Image (cartoon, coloured by chain):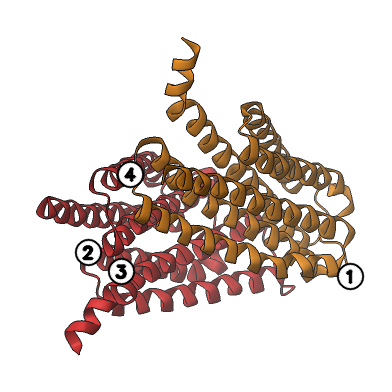
Chain colours: A orange, B red
Amino acid sequence: MRDIFDAELAQLGQDLAAMSGRVERAITDAGVALLTADVTLAESVIAADLEIDAIERDLDERCVLLLAQQQPVATDLRIVVSALRMSATLERMGDLARHIAQVARGRYPRHAVPQHLSGTFTEMHDAAVRVARRTTTLLGNHELPLAESIEQDDDLLDELHEDTFAALLNGTWNGSIQEAVDVTLLGRYYERFGDHGVSIARRVTYLVTGVLGQELDRSAS
Amino acid sequence: MRDIFDAELAQLGQDLAAMSGRVERAITDAGVALLTADVTLAESVIAADLEIDAIERDLDERCVLLLAQQQPVATDLRIVVSALRMSATLERMGDLARHIAQVARGRYPRHAVPQHLSGTFTEMHDAAVRVARRTTTLLGNHELPLAESIEQDDDLLDELHEDTFAALLNGTWNGSIQEAVDVTLLGRYYERFGDHGVSIARRVTYLVTGVLGQELDRSAS
């Protein structure tokens, strides 16, 4: 029984990492679609989000089955409950990538982001892609320095988000109202994406240091 | 054992309803603060959100304890897992009320919402307050017509959200960029608030008709 359960827990971790890989692809493609006004790529992100939603439902069903059949306690229980929460967070990250793609699609053939903010949004894109990539890796290997990097990129996303407000509100804005609305929403989507990455980073850290930490302490002493 | 567990499940439901009561208070006060530029009320919403966050953590801990100690299966398990998810959703609704209050505080002593949109935002406020009030009641009594009403108010919130975009983008906007940014974000906060209310309404409906439905079917046949 225990071997089977261990295999199921390991599979759960792999599936979360795979789901995160989908989110990584989604945020990468959404940003490229946004920055290059690529409507085909935007459409592909929007379509692929349905698959991410389906993965969440499947993962959740399996978590509930694991709880019912294996009746886990202590660390095992924390792992399954964390998986439930992390799949919901990844699903939300996929939604945010889709929202970015929808803005890109809605403005096509124009660029949604005005020229003078393309540098800021390129930086936001790069930071969000790093958050997603490191989330995928972290879910696979539990290397905690990755969690720290995710926090740093989230701080960077917050700063860049502030930069977009400054550009909108410092009195020199000469874009349209549509551009102001788009920049406001896009900035918020990227900022939230970072928050969700941090949420996962902290859950993994808690699992490794907080609960599993008891075992780590034992092996260290 | 069973009696104790039933009492614990009932308590969980009451605590979710009480948490929803806090959210109801938060969204009510946030909207009044927004529409009347009441900075003291806005501050109180922002401060009270910490309590909502604390209630979520407490509820989650108790759900995990229930899973560990009672090892529930079938309907009982679904109830506990749903409680975990609904507490996260209520926490998020509290965040959105706080965001609305933060906009109100940030613009004080001015009104964040331009005069010509105060009717639209009053309607959004009223719909969001109804969503919160019915969510509280639904969590307490599981009366499914309330779930239907929540869906209808969510549809109304979506329409009103569209109205704010129309006001921004129909070419007649003569407000400031700050007002455009605020209206964009406030509209999004209200729209998301409705989505979360629907999420809870559907979870309760699923618990009552989907899982418990097997028992209902039996008693009906």
Mark 1 neighbour density, 10 Å: few (under 14) some (14–19) many (20 or more) = few
Q: Which mark is residue B140?
A: 2
Q: Earlier in the sequence, mark 3 or mark 4?
A: 4
Inspect the image, locate mark 2, and give the three-letter code of the amino acid beneath it.
Gly
Q: Chain of mark 4?
A: B
Q: Residue at x 46, y 16 (%)?
A: A217
- Using the numbered discs, state the Cα–Cα distance from disc 2 to disc 3 in whole angstroms: 10 Å
Residue A145 placed where, x, y %? Answer: 65, 26
Determine the secondary structure under disc 3: helix
- The answer to whether marks 1 and 2 sit on the same chain is no
B109 and B135: which is toward the camera: B135
- State which mark lies toward you, 4 or 2: 4
- Using the numbered discs, state the Cα–Cα distance from disc 3 to disc 4 in whole angstroms: 27 Å
The residue that disc 4 covers is B64
Disc 1 to disc 2: CB gap under 8 Å = no
- The answer to whether marks 2 and 3 sit on the same chain is yes
- Using the numbered discs, state the Cα–Cα distance from disc 4 to disc 1 in whole angstroms: 50 Å
Residue A1 placed where, x, y %? Answer: 41, 47
The residue that disc 3 covers is B134
Q: Quadrant of residue A56?
A: bottom right
A149 and A106: which is toward the camera: A149
Determine the secondary structure under disc 2: helix
Disc 3 to disc 1: CB gap under 8 Å = no
